[in-house]
Image (spheres, rainbow, N blue to C red):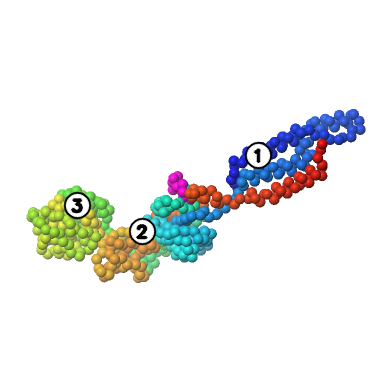
């Protein structure tokens, strides 16, 4: 309960005045005294506590004080807080991260938040609603919709996207929508710190619907596997975020054959983690780890990895221009420089970039040749043209200027030319040869240079049957064949998921797991893994910050109860009048 009109507290002076009046008013009583002795004793008893005597013997005083105090209380404007709609635009920000799937009694937190949203929409019939979902790219589901049925239908269609909520982006997005007329913004999530709100949001009211419920959670925090000479070796880190010790089963499954490679019992102490290591497992290209436990969150109970020979390092010849090294660093590779002997030693496990053509006949892995160390360049002029090779799917080199070229390799396939002279070639082994020194071109000044480097690295560093690792809904360009039918994505059980026009528009599926991409007749595997932040459950609370513009917020959320006290006040006045009438009025 609260008081709305504190300024009226000065009226408390009136009961105080009446109280002082009764303290000091003269009081006469008719007393029959049988003797002088008894009269003196009665006077002494009267003088002991004259103020208390006045209060004890005067019922009229109590009635008057009660009426005055009740009147003062009414003037202070008592009210009870209530959850009441604030007029105007309402924005719902919905957390669709994987952690919203936590829940008890077969009901997830996301489902409970959906029900809460429906109740809010029903209570504000006819008002405009906007629904925004969280993620790397916040999305609008409905915009200023006033049709209650359409809003409820949109809420029913909401689904968990599994990616991290990135709530800060959603808050900024909502601020941009409410920047002009203000809005009442409700955030449905598991937890959100008050520090996320700016002090300058004077025309926006924020209501955070957090979850105060504690969940029991065991998660596969880390999972990795590697092929060794003795077979496959796997490591699993299991974290117990609950307050009690937990016991369960850990399983390892080959997803391609559906064979169960391992099924063992484990125990982890409360608030601790345990690291499990398994060696000499059967060979497998796709492994899934799963824990069978009784907890409140299943999304982090499984994890999958691809076992391949993916390369993440590049060794650049120290004789090449510094810009070549910078370009390979820009595409996310760990880059180092080396001599001819170091390049040869690293050829089997790294991407080699050099101008030493002798490496074209050494080793078993393809290399990238930029320039030649055995020939001299000759001046050239003309426009650059490229073929429909996957290397140029996202890299347009038609505006590149080349001043000189090295002689081509007669047995290699030409995929780009300057005029009618070969500029870029490929060998049957997969080697990529650029017949020009970088300093003889203006290529580093064009955005196509790092894109070409990225395409070359993607072509060489991964196995032919894998695309790599992704997080849910991650947008990432992948190397495609450029086939007209596009790139199709299927689950590992061959269930169709989606189709992309080409590799540049690729986006990972929502649900974690192993998937297949089919492109131009070829098939590659890739894994979608849950982000680490979605393996940790946090608790929050329900709170409200700010109010909407126009003063409407000051009148909302208050259930005034002062009028309910008018009847008791009237009753007190009637009783006071009756007491006064019966006692009569003294002269």
* Image spot of residue 420 (x, y percent): 10, 62
Which structural element holds mark 3? Answer: helix
Q: Which residue is mark 3?
A: 444
Q: What number is the disc on residue 471?
A: 2
Instruction: Give the extent of the magenta segment.
Output: 195-205
Numbered disc in front, either 2 or 3: 3
Q: Is residue 554 above or below residue 288?
A: above
- Considering every residue shown, the one lying at the far right of the view is 34
Residue at x 48% of width, y 53% of height? 184
Circle 3: is it few (<14), some (14-19), or many (20+) Cα within 10 Å? Answer: some
Which structural element holds mark 2? Answer: loop
Numbered disc in front, either 1 or 3: 1
Q: Earlier in the sequence, mark 1 or mark 3?
A: 1
Q: Earlier in the sequence, mark 2 or mark 3?
A: 3
Numbered disc in front, either 1 or 2: 1
Circle 1: is it few (<14), some (14-19), or many (20+) Cα within 10 Å? Answer: some
Residue 196: in magenta span: yes
Instruction: From the image, give the main secondary structure of the stretch colored magenta.
Output: loop
Residue at x 81% of width, y 38% of height? 586
Q: Which residue is mark 1?
A: 12
């Amino acid at each position: 309960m609260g008081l709305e009109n504190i300024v009226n507290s000065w009226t408390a002076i009136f009961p105080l005045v009446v109280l002082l009046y009764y303290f000091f008013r003269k009081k006469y009583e008719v007393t029959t005294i049988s003797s002088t002795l008894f009269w003196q004793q009665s006077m002494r008893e009267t003088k002991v506590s004259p103020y208390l005597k006045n209060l004890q013997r005067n019922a009229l005083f109590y009635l008057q004080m009660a009426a005055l105090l009740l009147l003062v209380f009414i003037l202070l404007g008592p009210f009870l807080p209530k959850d009441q709609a604030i007029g105007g635009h309402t924005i719902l920000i919905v957390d669709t991260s994987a952690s919203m799937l936590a829940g008890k009694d077969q009901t997830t937190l996301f489902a409970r938040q959906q029900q809460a949203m429906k109740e809010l929409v029903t209570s504000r019939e006819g008002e405009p609603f906007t629904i925004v979902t969280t993620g790397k790219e916040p999305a609008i589901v409905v915009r200023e919709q006033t049709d209650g049925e359409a809003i409820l239908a949109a809420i029913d269609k909401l689904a968990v996207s599994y990616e991290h909520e990135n709530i800060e982006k959603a808050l900024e997005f909502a601020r941009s929508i409410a920047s002009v007329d203000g809005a009442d913004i409700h955030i449905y999530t598991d937890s959100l710190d008050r520090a996320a709100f700016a002090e300058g949001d004077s025309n926006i009211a924020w209501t955070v619907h957090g979850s105060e419920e504690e969940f029991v959670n065991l998660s596969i925090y880390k999972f990795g596997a590697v092929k060794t000479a003795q077979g496959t070796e796997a490591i699993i880190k299991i974290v117990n975020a609950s307050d009690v010790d937990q016991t369960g089963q850990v399983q390892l499954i080959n997803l391609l054959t559906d064979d169960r490679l391992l099924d063992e019992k484990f125990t982890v102490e409360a608030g601790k983690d345990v690291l499990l290591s398994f060696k000499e497992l059967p060979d497998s290209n796709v492994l899934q780890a799963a824990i069978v436990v009784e907890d409140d969150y299943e999304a982090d109970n499984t994890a999958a990895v691809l076992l391949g020979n993916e390369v993440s390092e590049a060794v650049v010849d120290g004789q090449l221009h510094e810009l070549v090294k910078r370009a390979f660093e820009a595409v996310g590779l760990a880059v180092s420089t080396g001599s001819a002997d170091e390049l040869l030693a690293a050829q089997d496990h790294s991407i080699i970039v050099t101008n030493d053509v002798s490496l074209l006949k050494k080793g078993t892995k393809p290399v990238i040749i930029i320039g030649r160390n055995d020939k001299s360049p000759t001046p050239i002029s003309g426009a650059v043209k490229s073929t429909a090779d996957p290397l140029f799917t996202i890299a347009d080199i038609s505006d590149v200027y080349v001043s000189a070229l090295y002689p081509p390799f007669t047995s290699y396939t030409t995929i780009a030319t300057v005029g009618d002279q070969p500029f870029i070639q490929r060998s049957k082994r997969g080697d990529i040869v650029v017949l020009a020194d970088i300093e003889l071109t203006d290529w580093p000044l064009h955005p196509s240079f790092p894109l070409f480097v990225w395409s070359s690295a993607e072509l060489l560093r991964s196995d032919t049957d894998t695309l790599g690792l992704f997080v849910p809904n991650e947008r990432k360009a992948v190397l495609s064949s450029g086939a007209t039918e596009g790139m199709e994505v299927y689950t590992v059980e061959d269930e169709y998921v989606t189709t992309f026009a080409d590799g540049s528009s690729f986006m990972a599926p929502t649900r974690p797991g192993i998937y297949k991409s089919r492109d131009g007749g070829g098939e590659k595997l890739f894994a979608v893994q849950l982000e680490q932040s979605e393996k940790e459950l946090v608790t929050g609370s329900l709170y409200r910050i700010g109010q909407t513009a126009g003063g409407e917020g000051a009148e909302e959320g208050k259930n005034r109860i002062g009028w309910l006290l008018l009847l008791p006040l009237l009753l007190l006045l009637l009783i006071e009048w009756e007491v006064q009438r019966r006692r009569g009025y003294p002269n």
